[in-house]
Image (spheres, rainbow, N blue to C red):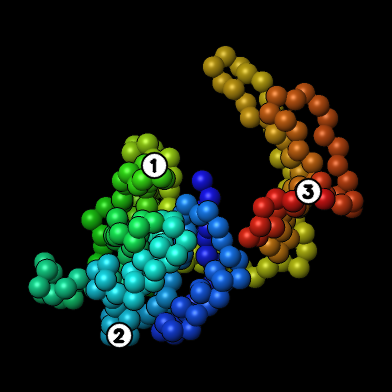
Amino acid sequence: MRIACLQFDPQVGDVANNFTKAYAILAKAEPEDLDLLVLPEMAFSGYNFSSLEQITPYLEPTTSGVTSSWARTTALKYSCVVTVGYPEKVDDALSRSSNPECYNSTVTVDNEGKTIANYRKSFLYYTDETWAHEGSGFYCGIIKGLGTVAMGICMDLNPYKFETPWSTCEFACYVLQKKANLVILSMAWLTRQDQLPYEIIVILANRCGTEGEATYAGTSTVLGIKDDEVNVYGILGRGEEKLLIVDTDEHPMAKIISGTKSTEI
């Protein structure tokens, strides 16, 4: 399965330029033989709206606004499934509420340009609560070429309203219950910390083998984390009984670089 994630920096309310950015990234990458393309939460409107009044000009009709049109065009161009986030407003004639019925949603379009899913975020973040309704529940369905697919949006990963116990893991349990083989998450996930100017060395010393019915994962490793890179200084196999010795002053054996595949050094 060939999967593409389009990460970019959309600005609040700057829809035209946000589309231009996305087109430019795709044009530069020239992706081929994609099965799935996923974009962030509210990819073209931007995310941080402070009120219903502020976001109203950017609300889109269910699966028929500018984001959905972009998804259909892109799905046909690259012959792949496309999932992208957008701020949804239900047609007043179809709404069950006297107030505007709005959702933080994702639309999913298949490789023939047909809308196959419209998921509405179930667990709202504080920013969402200023304008959006809760969705009716997580999504899971069979998508041709992808299998059994579960979908969520950002805060869906967290406990409901940050109030239920972390151990509840509502979304993760839903994925397991539905036996999904693919999970799609459109995100606007925060970081609370600036990048550190130095490397952090992480040592994972695991055991291998079995004890009764318990089987251990092995793969002891030494990693270095700095900026957008993870350096792999050494790693053992799952079942190896061996002493791993590394020197973090020397070049790592491999690097994991944001946005690319792991590369050998």
Looking at the rendered structure, the kind of residue marked 2 is Pro
Which residue shows up at 76% across the image and 68% down it?
197
Count neighbours of disc 1 (C-alpha within 10 A) and say few if under 14, some if 14 to 19, many if 20 or more: few
Structural distance between the alpha carbons of marks 3 and 2: 48 Å
Could you tell me how far apart the alpha carbons at marks 1 and 2 are, in whole angstroms? 36 Å
Label 1 sits on what residue type?
A: Gly
* Viewer-side label of 1, 2: 1
Q: Which mark is residue 57?
A: 2
Question: Percent x, y for residue 81?
Answer: 41, 56
Please state the horizontal and vertical placement of residue 92, each as a whole percent of the image. Answer: 13, 75
Q: Which residue is mark 1?
A: 147
Q: CA distance from mark 3 to mark 1?
A: 32 Å
Give whichever of 23, 251 is nearer the camera. Answer: 23
Which element carries disc 1, helix, strand or loop? Answer: strand
Which is nearer the N-term, disc 3 or disc 1? 1
Q: Secondary structure at mark 3?
A: strand
**Label 3, on which residue?**
264
* Nearer the observer, 217 or 14: 14
Q: Residues within 10 Å of mark 2 (few under 14, many from 20)?
A: few
Q: Which mark is residue 126?
A: none
Q: Earlier in the sequence, mark 3 or mark 2?
A: 2
Q: Is residue 57 visible?
A: yes
Q: Nearer the viewer, residue 155 or 25?
A: 25
Question: Dividing the picture into quarters, in which one does residue 77 lie?
Answer: bottom left
